Amino acid sequence: MKTISILIPAYNEEQVLHTLINRLDAVTSELPHYQFEYLFVNDGSTDNTLFLLKQLVEHRTDVSYVNLSRNFGKEVAMLAGFDHTKGEAVIIIDADLQDPPELIPEMIGYWEQGYDDVFAKRRSRAGESWFKKWSSSRYYKILETLSNIPVQRDTGDFRLLDRRCIDALQLLRESQRYTKGMYSWIGFNKKEILFDRDPRAAGETKWNYGKLFNLAIDGITSSTIAPLRFSSLFGVIISVVAFFFMIFVVIRALLFGDPVPGYPSLMAVILFLGGIQLLSLGIIGEYLGKVFYETKGRPVYFVEEYVSTIKKDDSAE
Ligand code: UDP
Ligand code: MG
C-alpha cells in the first residue's frame, strides 16, 4: 500500500481543525488503497491548536505533528513538513479549508499517471477584494518577465508532490524562502487542475498587505537578479544622456556665453539622480540582506517536539 502524507501547516487554527479533519476523513475513506498520514506542523500557535493536536494523536494512528519552537511563517513550516513526511507523495493543504480536500482523489489520479507535481489552479477567488486580485495578477506578470522560469499563475501551495520533488525541495534550504518559486525551479512533470477557492471557513487570515508586500519582494529577489541589471542599465542610459547634455551645455556657453540661469534644471537633475541612486542602493541592499541571512548558515527552524504514530508499511517497499 502506498503512503500519502497530507501536510498541513497550522498557525492558530483551533476553530477549523475539527472541520478540516472531518472533510479530510470523508475524502480519504473513499480511497482505501492508500495509507494516509495527516502531518500537522504547528507553527508556534498561541491558541489551543497544539492541545487539539495532542488530543488527536492520542486517539488516532494516522495523525502526527511537528511542533516548531516558535512561529517561523508558513514557508518555513512547510520545509519542516517536508523534512518529516513519510509518504511516497505529499499533499500540501491549508488548514483553513480554502483548499477543498475533495480535489485530492483527482490529484492522486494524475500522480498515478506519472505526474510529479499536480497543482491546483484557482478559477475564482471568492472572498478576496478586487485590489488583491488585481495586484496579484500584476505581480505574477512582473515576476514571470523578470525571472526566466515560468511562474505558476493563480496557484498556491495546494498541490500533490511526488517523493522526488520533496527530496529536491529538501535540498533547497535557504532561510528566506519563496516556495512558490521553488516548485517551478525544481522542474519535473507538472499538471494543473482547476478549482474554485473558497473563503476562509473560520478565523482570520494571517496575511496583511505588509506581509504580502514582503513576500512579493522576496519572490523577486530570491528568483532573479534582474532589478540589479535594471539599475546598471538605468545608470548607463543616464550617463549617455548626461554626456550629450554636457556637450550641449559647453558648446552653448562657448557660442552664446553663459549668464548663469538654470537653477530649475539643476535642481531637477540633482533630485532625479538622487532618487535613482537611493533606489539602486535600496535594491543592492535587498540582495545584500539576503546574503547576510544566508551566510549566517543558521538552521532554518527548530523542532520543539515531533510526535508520530504512523508505522510505515514496510512490505510495500
Ligand atoms: N500559516 C502558518 N504560519 C504562519 C501563517 C500561516 O503555518 O505564520 C498557515 C495557516 O495556518 C494556514 C496557511 O498557512 O494553514 C495559510 O494561511 P492563511 O490562511 O492565513 O493565508 P491566506 O490563505 O490568507 O493566504
Ligand atoms: Mg487562508
Image (tube, rainbow, N blue to C red):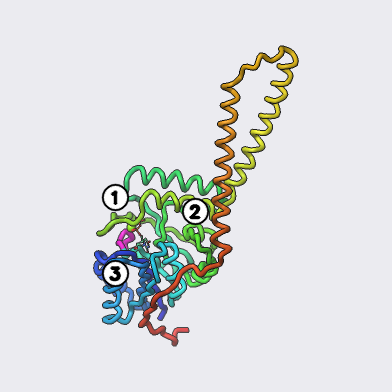
Q: Is residue 52 above or below residue 117?
A: below
Residue 240 seen: yes
Q: Picture coordinates of residue 65 (x, y %)? A: 36, 75
Per the image, label 1 sits on a secondary structure element best described as loop
Kindly identify which residue carries mark 3. 49
The amino acid type found where label 3 is placed reads Thr
Query: Quadrant for ligand 2?
Result: bottom left
Residue 113 seen: no
Q: Quadrant of residue 22?
A: bottom left
The answer to whether residue 140 is left or right of residue 244 is: left
Q: Depth-wise, is mark 3 or mark 1 nearer the camera?
A: 3
Per the image, label 2 sits on a secondary structure element best described as helix
The answer to whether residue 73 is left or right of residue 204 is: right
User: How dense is the environment of label 2, judged by Cα within 10 Å: few (below 14), some, or many (20 and up)?
Assistant: some
Q: What residue span does the magenta drawing correspond to?
A: 96-100
Q: Picture coordinates of residue 187 (x, y %)? A: 54, 62
Residue at point 35%, 63% (across, down) = 94
Q: Depth-wise, is mark 1 or mark 2 nearer the camera?
A: 2
Q: Picture coordinates of residue 138 (x, y %)? A: 45, 43
Ligand 1 within 8 A of label 2's CB? no
User: How dense is the environment of label 1, judged by Cα within 10 Å: few (below 14), some, or many (20 and up)?
Assistant: few
The amino acid type found where label 2 is placed reads Asp
Residue at point 40%, 52% (across, down) = 211
Secondary structure mostly seen in the magenta stretch: loop
Task: State the mark number for residue 218.
Answer: 2
Q: Answer yes or no: do the residues labelled 3 and 1 have beta carbons within 8 Å?
A: no
Task: State the mark number for residue 62.
Answer: none
Kindly identify which residue carries mark 1. 127
Q: Is residue 149 above or below residue 279?
A: below
| First along the sequence among labels 2 and 3 | 3
The answer to whether residue 206 is left or right of residue 143 is: left
